[in-house]
Image (cartoon, helix red, strand yellow):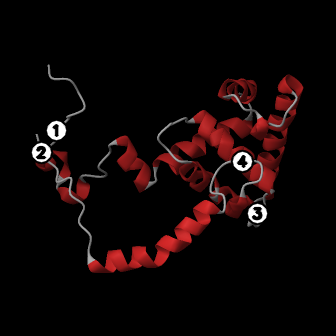
Amino acid sequence: MRGTDKRTTVRRRVFLRGAATGPAAVAVAAAGMTIGPEAAWATDLRSLKPATMTVLARAARDIFPHDRFPDRFYIAAVLPYDDQAAGDAALRTLLEDGAARLDAEARRRFGKDYIRLPAEEQRVAVLKAAETTPFFRKLRGDLVVSLYNQKEVWAKLGYEGSSHEHGGYLHRGFNDLDWLPEA
């Protein structure tokens, strides 16, 4: 089994870059990098409504739930929709109408907008009602890539990344599966 060095190594440039951006990151986090009806991150959008983006981010968390993932990963997964919708009216309509339908279904069933439903079970029930729609299929299909293609997410899932650059798995330790029980 390949041993990995668990120590953190930091080069001077990386440290200085992090020190310069750290306060800004803390300010952004304090300003509301969470999913909620009054999310500060959703106010600086080009084409989609803030309410639509918060619904998309909450739906992303409900479709692919991971307790160890902070909201910022789900927000990063849906933010590209704003840029895409700026140049694609059909996509903008699909997302705006889809989010509005989730809200309407949530109000019909539980008397609250989707984003304000406190229980995950309630939100999942609303999503199940929409799972055959083009909106849901588009969202789920895109999230597979946009959520799980974030390198910080890879670390949380235990994926070390591509082996191609390191000679492939054959020369990198293809049998170092320390997460499987010994046979």
Can I make out residue 14 in this image?
yes
In front: label 4 or label 3: 4
Of 33 and 178, which appears nearest the observer? Answer: 33
Question: Spatial distance from mark 2 to mark 1, Cα to Cα?
Answer: 6 Å
Q: Residues within 10 Å of mark 4 (few under 14, many from 20)?
A: some
CB-based contact (under 8 Å), mark 2 and mark 1: yes
Q: Amino acid at mark 1?
A: Asp
Residue 164 placement (x, y as % from top left): 24, 55
**Pointer 2: residues within 10 angstroms few (<14), some, or many (20+)?**
few
- Left or right: residue 52 compared with residue 21: right
Residue 19 versus residue 46 in the image, above or below: below
> Could you tell me how far apart the alpha carbons at marks 1 and 3 are, in whole angstroms?
45 Å
As drawn, the label of residue 43 is: 3
Q: Earlier in the sequence, mark 4 or mark 3?
A: 4
Name the amino acid, label 2.
Answer: Arg
Q: Residue at x 12, y 45 (%)?
A: 2
Q: Quadrant of the N terminus?
A: top left
- Residue type pointed to by label 3: Thr
The circle drawn on residue 22 is none
Residue at image mark 4: 36
What residue do we see at 73% from left, 52% from top?
A: 53
Question: Pointer 2: what residue?
Answer: 2
Q: Is residue 146 above or below residue 127?
A: below
Indicate the amino acid at tag 4. Gly
Between 151 and 85, the one nearer to me in the picture: 151
Residue 179 screen position, x and y as percent:
25, 32
